[in-house]
Amino acid sequence: MSLKVVILAAGKGTRMKSSMPKVLHCVANKPMVEHVVDAASSLGAQKTVLVVGHGADQVRATVTRKVEYVEQTEQLGTGHAVQQALPLLEPNDTVLIAYGDVPLTNPETFKQLIDDVTDTNIALLTVIMQDPTGYGRIVRDTAGNVQAIVEQKDATEAQLKICEGNTGILAARASALTELLGKIDNNNVQEEYYLTDIFELAVSQGMTITTHQPEHEWETAGVNSRQQMAELERIYQRTQAEKLMTAGVTLRDPARIDVRGNITVGQDSIIDVNCVFEGDVTIGESVIIGSNCFISNATIAAGTVIKANTVIEDSIVGENCTLGPFARLRPGAELTENAHIGNFVEIKKATIGKGSKVNHLSYVGDSTIGEGVNIGAGTITCNYDGANKHQTIIEDGVFIGSCTQLVAPVKIGKEAVIGAGSTITKEVAAGQLAFTRAPVKTVDNWPRPVKKKK
Ligand code: UD1
Ligand code: CA
């Protein structure tokens, strides 16, 4: 069996009030349509076809996975949309139909439908709702077999009372879709080619329909407005928080964490409120993360403590390090175990050796810092000459006095000491003391200025 997934994504999304097509708006920082494309890929789809229309070029430019596109220039209905994809399918394919604005369907739910498909059976995802207003209604016979789907606008009073709604998500053999879609018309209130019309036709031809319900109703929720998108964002975040807690992570408040990517956290780690995680983040066991941290594409090893308001991007942090509060690791920062990075310290493209400390108000960029180094408050690696970046190398056991400027390229040898307030422009050899210091001048009985009387 070869699985192909067709994702409808041609709609404009008028209620979003946006210059961007609806399906490119993000849940968890990922375009909604990409959530669906990713689900298709996790199901092992051999081909994914996106039916695009409004903002087609923007969609093409945004989706990262390999998919195929068909353009539906006029939105004549969901049936018409699926028809556009038929030329890209083989008769024997099992076809899953999904929607670019329904981002959170669990792949397992899709799989139940796919598994049901035969040459003569179509599988449909339905949902029992308290208020099915707006949804197509599932019409069953007295034996419970699906007979048809009627759209809200075409339904009789009696049919409107049915609370089993059509999610629109279905799976069928491509040959069946081709045959049935070839027979639908647009003789209905909306004058659209309804995908839903294939069900009555299928039954009349002796085909069968099986149905499944999702585990959660939100799996089938579509987004038409920014409010609905925000609701799905909260649902998504809640499920991420649940997964972390199930894995043995303490969340000070599961309603105040945002995961916008893939995260794994070791057990007994504790995450305080308002932390945001982006991209691929791996956190070891017993890591403590204070409030308001932003961590993106990073690996944090076991036992590390990250204090409040720390920002970490594209960096690696070893075991038992201490960071923050208010520390910033920019791309390429690499801390070895037991390193300490304190408040208002910025590290960029630099390796900090085992047990080394940069505790206050410093900038360390394009540097290699050895083990057991102490960098005093206010130290700056002057790595940029206005045109090029240069390296600073500080060997093991060096002590850098406060407020030092290290003008790169420069190297400080093992165990050397730099006096406070120095501007170091040449290599300092191992074991040397180096300093540059203007002499202190004093003036006796200095008359301090006084405020003028008005
Ligand atoms: C559709 C179903 C309805 C179901 C509901 C669930 C039909 C006829 N009706 O109704 O039974 O309860 O979804 O939300 O299928 N699209 C295109 N091209 C088109 C038309 C639609 O790509 O020509 C896309 C839209 O962008 C949207 C999706 O298909 O993502 C559904 O279309 P929409 O018009 O919203 O269908 P509903 O009227 O909500
Ligand atoms: Ca809709």
Image (cartoon, rainbow, N blue to C red):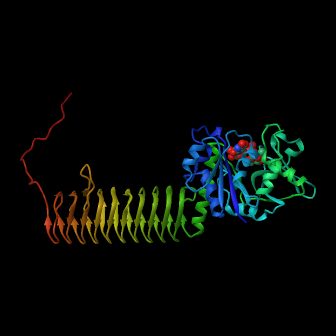
- Measuring from the top left, give residue 77's x and y in whole percent: 75, 42
Q: Left or right of 2: which side holds 322? A: left
- Measuring from the top left, give residue 260's x and y in whole percent: 54, 56
Tell which residue pokes out farthest to the right in this image: 142
Which quadrant would the N terminus be assigned to in this image? bottom right
Q: Residue at x 64, y 55 (%)?
A: 36
Nearest the eye: 315 or 179? 179
Q: Left or right of 27: which side holds 424? A: left
Nearest the eye: 221 or 41? 41
Q: Quadrant of residue 22?
A: top right
Q: Residue at x 41, y 65 (%)?
A: 316
Tell which residue pokes out farthest to the left in this image: 444
Tell which residue pokes out farthest to the top in this image: 454
| Rendered view: 212 above or below 52 | below
Which quadrant would the C terminus be assigned to in this image? top left
| Rendered view: 55 above or below 178 | above
- Measuring from the top left, give residue 117's x and y in whole percent: 79, 62
Nearest the eye: 417 or 119? 119
Q: Quadrant of residue 176?
A: bottom right
- Measuring from the top left, give residue 351's x and y in whole percent: 33, 66
Q: Quadrant of residue 245?
A: bottom right
Q: Is residue 67 visible?
A: yes
Q: Is residue 135 visible?
A: no
| Count of numbered circles on the image | 0
Nearest the eye: 75 or 452? 75
Q: Residue at x 87, y 45 (%)?
A: 159
Quadrant in which ligand 1 is drawn: top right
